[in-house]
Image: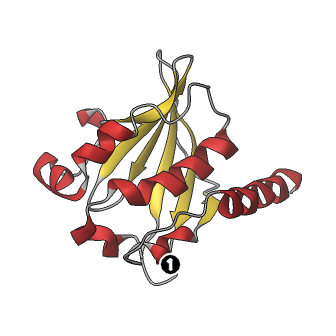
Amino acid sequence: MKKLNLLAVLVIVFFLATSVSNATGVRSALNEYEIAPVEDLHMGKQVKAIWTISYSKEEVPVTVVKRNTIEGTEYVVQSDYFVVSYYSNAAGFGVKETRRSWSEVPKKVNKAVLNQEEMQNQRIISPNKMEDEKALGLIASYLPDLINDGYTHILN
């Protein structure tokens, strides 16, 4: 229970600290989000934890799956329309393409939804390795920027 309260406080702090302004207002609804752990699942050996990020009560939340790999920790963010990974290791924290074996989204659909230029911009978000709470806050904040304007409705 203490961890859940700590997570809620961290999410609120990140929300207040990472308000993103957009002149068009298209993404203004994506400034608010809720992160919730998914419990009571048999996750297997590679999957260490699962969370959901909700930007709206009307839409299906995106799922974040934590996987430990040889290179470090990967947070696989997925929905029915896209999949992308954020990594955390000694080189820092940033975004990268998801391994094909972890993706159920067709590559053509994924490329249409994700903004390739923003993928390059987010390659290194921080030079530091991140703990789960901070990584989830950064993912929730930066993920909307990865989605092309024509597809932002899938988050809200």
> Among all residues in the image, which is located at the extreme front?
23
* Residue 152 x, y percent position in the rendering: 32, 70
Q: Is residue 142 above or below residue 153?
A: above
Tell me the crowding category of disc 1: few under 14, some 14 to 19, or many 20 or more residues within 10 angstroms, Cα based. Answer: some
Residue identifier under label 1: 56
Secondary structure at badge 1 equals: loop
Query: In this rendering, would 6 be left or right of 17?
Result: right
- Image quadrant of residue 153? bottom left
Query: In this rendering, would 38 be left or right of 115?
Result: right
Q: How is the image coloured?
A: secondary structure
**Do we see residue 95 in this rendering?**
yes
Count of numbered badges drawn on the protein: 1
Residue in the picture at 60% in, 42% down: 135
* Residue 104 x, y percent position in the rendering: 25, 49
Residue in the picture at 41% in, 60% down: 144
Q: Quadrant of the C terminus?
A: bottom left
**Do we see residue 44 in this rendering?**
no
Q: Quadrant of the N terminus?
A: bottom right
> Among all residues in the image, which is located at the extreme bottom?
58
Residue in the picture at 61% in, 25% down: 128
Q: Report the amino acid beneath label 1.
A: Ser
Q: Is residue 115 above or below residue 71?
A: below
* Residue 24 x, y percent position in the rendering: 37, 76
> Among all residues in the image, which is located at the extreme right?
2
* Residue 81 x, y percent position in the rendering: 26, 61
